[in-house]
Amino acid sequence: MATFFSKLKNGLQKTNRAIAEIFTGKQIDDALYEELESALLMADTGVAATQYLLDELKVRVKKTKASDSLQVKALLIDAMTDLLEPLQGKLVLASQPTVMMVAGVNGAGKTTSIGKLTWHFAHSGHSVLLAAADTFRAAAREQLSVWADRNQGGQNNTRIGKVEIISTEGADPSSVCFDAVIAGKARGTNLVIADTAGRLPTQTHLMAELTKIKRVIQKADASAPHEVLLVLDGNTGQNALAQAQAFDAAINVTGLIITKLDGTAKGGVLAAIALWGRELAATGKPAPHVYFIGVGEALEDLQPFVAREFAQALLS
């Protein structure tokens, strides 16, 4: 069975193959840096993050007196790791219930990611209550119900936490989330996850609905939502950064899930997100963590983000 790292590296092969060609028997000169710049830009790293990495790499090459291209590649992996490390974060259940609000554009893999998160926590012994707040799309409610049933497939195993769902067709999404949080508190549930409808950040009325959902959740529990997660499609390149910035401006995103790093994604956008995170931190605003990355359809294909592992898969 393929390991998660091998799946990730295979998923990012467009980038790691291009990088490998650059560092094969090349001299350390301006031509190498120019090729590397082009490759990073093609990998969706973005102009600012590409320039940051090149500047950092040149400093490290000079400091270590690296003498061959493979040493330079190792230094690039180190520089990428250092840039990405602040994105690492562990998603923990610090409150009871911990309330997670999940958002994203249509087709990013939001509901599927919620299903996998549910599996992750249920199989760690936590009870989960799902709020189907995409109330006007029957397929979304049905998909969430399927995931709830699937996660209870081993319900005779007492180590698997109970999974329930609250779903009301045609109801106001905010009211469904409110009811779910109240029910979660009453039932002693460990985790409440609200699946909001997919929307583009340019759809002003739908973004306003999202802020309303968050506001109503706070009426049910003043400390909630404890996590506001945004699901991003790893194939969307710099659009993923733009989405993160727009959703964060509306609902203060605390964490990211990057999906579909399984064959066509280039992966460099995480460097751009990390640089944006540094800029946020410099202003005193907490930057979102990347909690999970996904490399396929299987339940185990959603795994915690590890900066060095990702940098190695991307660049080696």
Image: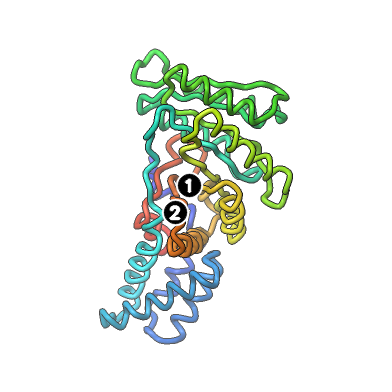
Estimate the spatial distance between the alpha carbons at disc 1 and disc 2, rounded to whole Å.
Answer: 8 Å
Query: Which residue sits at x=66%, y=30%?
Result: 173
In the structure shown, which secondary structural element does the residue marked by tag 1 occupy? loop
Q: Is residue 243 above or below residue 212?
A: below
Q: Residue 31, percent across and down?
A: 46, 85
In the structure shown, which secondary structural element does the residue marked by tag 2 occupy? loop
* Pointers 1 and 2 in contact (C-beta within 8 Å): yes
- The residue most toward the bottom is 30
Q: Is residue 15 visible?
A: no
Horizontally, residue 3 falls left or right of residue 243, namely left
Q: Quadrant of the N terminus?
A: top left
Q: Nearer the viewer, residue 25 or 188?
A: 188
The disc, 1 or 2, on the residue closer to the chain's N-terminal end is: 1
Kind of residue at disc 1: Thr
Q: Is residue 184 above or below residue 257?
A: above
Query: Which residue sits at x=48%, y=32%?
Result: 99
Give the crowd class for mark 2: few <14, some 14-19, many >=20 residues within 10 Å.
Answer: some
Q: Residue 287, percent across and down?
A: 46, 55
Kind of residue at disc 2: Pro
Q: Is residue 299 above or below residue 230?
A: above
Residue 254 image label: 1
Query: Which residue sits at x=53%, y=52%?
Result: 263
Q: Is residue 151 above or below residue 275?
A: above
Q: Residue 235, percent across and down?
A: 58, 54
Q: Give the residue at mark 2.
A: 286
Picture quadrant of residue 144: top right
Q: Is residue 58 visible?
A: yes
Q: Quadrant of the C terminus?
A: bottom left
